[in-house]
Structures are given as C-alpha cells and as structure tokens.
Amino acid sequence: MIQIKPILAAMRHHKAGTVLIALQIALTLAIVCNALFIIQQRTARLSRPSGVEESNLFVIRSDWADKSDPQHTDIQMQADLLALRQLGSVQDASPTNSFPLRGGGWDNFIKLAPDQVKMTTDAAIYFADEHSLATLGTKLIAGRNFTASEIGSQKPRDRLSSAQVIISKDLAQRLFPAGSALGKTIYVSADANKPSTVIGITDTLQAHMQSRRTPDYAYNAVLIPARLLDDGTVYLVRAKPGQLAAAMHDATKALYAQSRMRIIDRKDGVMTFAQVRQRFYKSDLGMAILMGIISVVLLAITAAGIVGLTSFWVGQRRKQIGVRRALGATRGDILNYFLTENLLIGIGGVLAGAVLAIGINLWMVTQFEMARLSLAYVAVGVVALLLLGQGAVLAPALRASHVSPVEATRSV
C-alpha cells in the first residue's frame, strides 16, 4: 500500500519542479477546455441548415457597366431572367439582392405598429419574385406565393414598402408567438408608414447576417416582391439535376449574349452554393483548426514536461530507489510510487486549471459575447489531463522500477 506522507515529503524537497508542472497542467487545462468549447461552437455552425436546397444551385453576380438608367436596368433584368429560364440546363432562376450564407446584405427593423419606437426584431430583406421559392428550394408551410402581377421594382434609396410579404417561420413565431402570422400586417422598416400583409410563411430560411454576432436574428427573413434596381444584380439559378457545370457555363454565356454592358467577376462572379457555404464558414473552420492545433501542441508540451521532470527525478533518486529495492520494495511498489506522486501533482494542477478555465470563459463572455462554458468540458478536460499525465509518467516510472538494489551500494 502506497503511503502518501512520504510522497508529500519528497515533493516538498522539489517544490520548484512540482509547482511548475502543476501550473503547466493548470494552464493547459484552462486553455484546452476553452479551445475545445470554441471548436464545438464553430463546428456546430458549419452544419446549420440554410433552409435552401443547396445542390444544383448557383449564384451569378452581374455588375452593370451602365449605371445611369434604372428603367433600362429593370428591362435588362427581365430579359436576363427570361433568357436564363429558357436554357435547357436550367430549371429556374430568380433575381435577388442577397441570400442565405452570403454574409452581408440588406436588413431592416421590423415593427408591428407604425408609431412603434423600439423595433420588435430585425430581419434580412430578400428581394424576390414568383420564381424565388422554387429556385431556392424553400418550402411554403402556410399561405401562398407571390404572383407575377405583384412583382414590382425598387431603387436602393426608395423607402422600403410592399403591400404583400412572405416571411420565414422563425420571424413569424417571434412576431406573433400566440398565433399565426398569416394575414397579419407588419412594418418592414424603421420609417415605414404603410403596412405589409403576410401572405405566406416559409419553412426554415436563414438570414444573410453572421448569426454568431446576431444569434437572435439568424433565421429572420422577409421576402419583398420586387426587383432591386441597383448597380449590380444577383441572380439565383437552379440547374437541372446533374447539369450544374453545364448550367453555369450556359448561364454566363446567355447573360453576355443579352448585353455586353455587364461585368461578371472571373473569381467569384459565378459560385456554386457549395462554394458560398465554404466561403461563409471559412473563418469558423479556420478558427476550429487553429484551436485544435493549439490544443494538441499544449498537450504535447505538457506531456513532454512531465516526462522530462520525472526522468530527472528518477536520475536524482537512483540510490534512494536502490535502497528501497534492497529493503524489499518490489518493482510494482516503485512504479506505483511515481504514478501516485504524479497523480497528486496532476490533481493539484487540474483543480487550479478548472477554476482558471471557468474564469477565462467568464471573461470571454463579457468581452466577446461568447456562450458560457459547459462544465462537461471542464470535467472531460480534468479526466483527459490526469490520464495524459499518468501516461506520460509511465515510461520514466518503469525505468525507475528496473533500478537494481545494487544501486544502494554505489557512491553518489
């Protein structure tokens, strides 16, 4: 049976090394727990539903070389859409100003009364037509779609107002938690003085906004029946199954055939929705990878520190170990001695590290609006660090257990 008091007495003779290893374990636990929590938060974002049927969908951004005549832009947009929809490789197409996962766009305050001072919530504004839902692959769960006669046009500086709107189910629940939003009226901008009637409610539809910073608005979306006559136009195009590459080629060619007075960027002017998703979550994926690398490096450094210090202690204590062996201590006794000693240091380190991990997280919550660290991460980290420490000390402890009793007769 291992006696704890002799181990503690020996540790007091090596205070510096004991404290350094305990501090290293504490810092590693604190950083790794928070790093793993950040990894979980970021990777969870990668799999969030967009509410869009992403396969076979692509995006074309066309910037107009001639930006002086909005009426001409409207005519050109209608001609572009007609040409796109007639392509054999294209299933449907629609105009918009933005879309889920774009990372930026038009968002407005939403109110329930014209004289309301404080907004009820915020929402992404998507300009759409009667083809938009089919192009996106977004389902209506209540109400109806827009009709062709309801689609108008709007300049960017015009006051946002529409007699009819379609909203996402998350926005509907936020605005009217006690009942259905269908048929109700809302005001779609801070300065709107005309109500908009909700004629349809979509299933899940993600906003274009970065929901890590605005989590309450992540799935708030309003579809406005209008073509936005801006300096550039975004076309959403759904290819027929298996014809995505052909549709992207055909669509670009068709748009240039309609007018050469446009600019389609070669780099990101035409993007599949898979590329849109990858670009949107690039920073999250990069942060997760970085945190993973930091965690692995810290764990490796901690393990190496434990191995190094224990090896040093074994070298210093060879004569003492030999004496114990000569007095009848078995190899198992020596092995258990070093494992127990390391375990005691590890327990002290993880207790301090658990407090430090929670403290760091609370600081990040106040500074960066992060979520609170789950204690499950701390518990898992404690177990992992203790197992890592025991694994790291095993090799030098085994070497110590093989010290011969003859070492007791050797001079120092």
Image: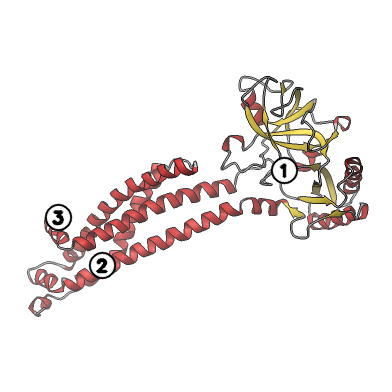
Query: Residue at horizontal 73%, vertical 35%?
Result: 139
Assess whether mark 2 and mark 1 are in contact (beta carbons under 8 angstroms). Answer: no
From this view, report whether residue 80 is shown above or below residue 226: below
Using the image, tell me which numbered label, if any, was put on residue 4: 3
Q: Secondary structure at mark 1?
A: loop
The residue to which callout 2 is attached is: 309
Q: Earlier in the sequence, mark 1 or mark 2?
A: 1
For image coordinates 10% across by 68% down, the residue present is: 324
Q: Is residue 319 above or below residue 117?
A: below
Quadrant of the snapshot with the N terminus: bottom left
Quarter the C terminus occupies = bottom left
| First in residue order: circle 3 vs circle 1 | 3
**Under tag 3, what secondary structure?**
helix
Residue 69, numbered circle:
none
The type of residue carrying mark 2 is Leu
Q: Position of residue 9 (x, y in %)?
A: 12, 58
What residue sits right under mark 1 in the picture?
A: 99
Q: How is the image coloured?
A: secondary structure
The answer to whether one can see residue 167 in this image is yes
Residue type (three-letter) at the residue carrying disc 3: Ile
| Rendering coords of residue 98 (x, y %) | 73, 43
* Furthest residue toward bottom: 410
Disc 3 and disc 2 in contact, CB within 8 angstroms: no
Horizontal arrangement in the rendering, residue 30 relative to residue 265 (left or right):
left
Name the spot of residue 242 as percent of width and height, x first.
79, 54
Is there any visible trace of residue 170 in the rendered image? no
Q: Earlier in the sequence, mark 3 or mark 2?
A: 3
Q: CA distance from mark 3 to mark 2?
A: 20 Å
What is the crowding at mark 3: few (fewer than 14 residues within 10 Å), some, or many (at least 20)? few
Which residue lies at the image location 84% right of the left edge and 46% below the top edge?
Answer: 91
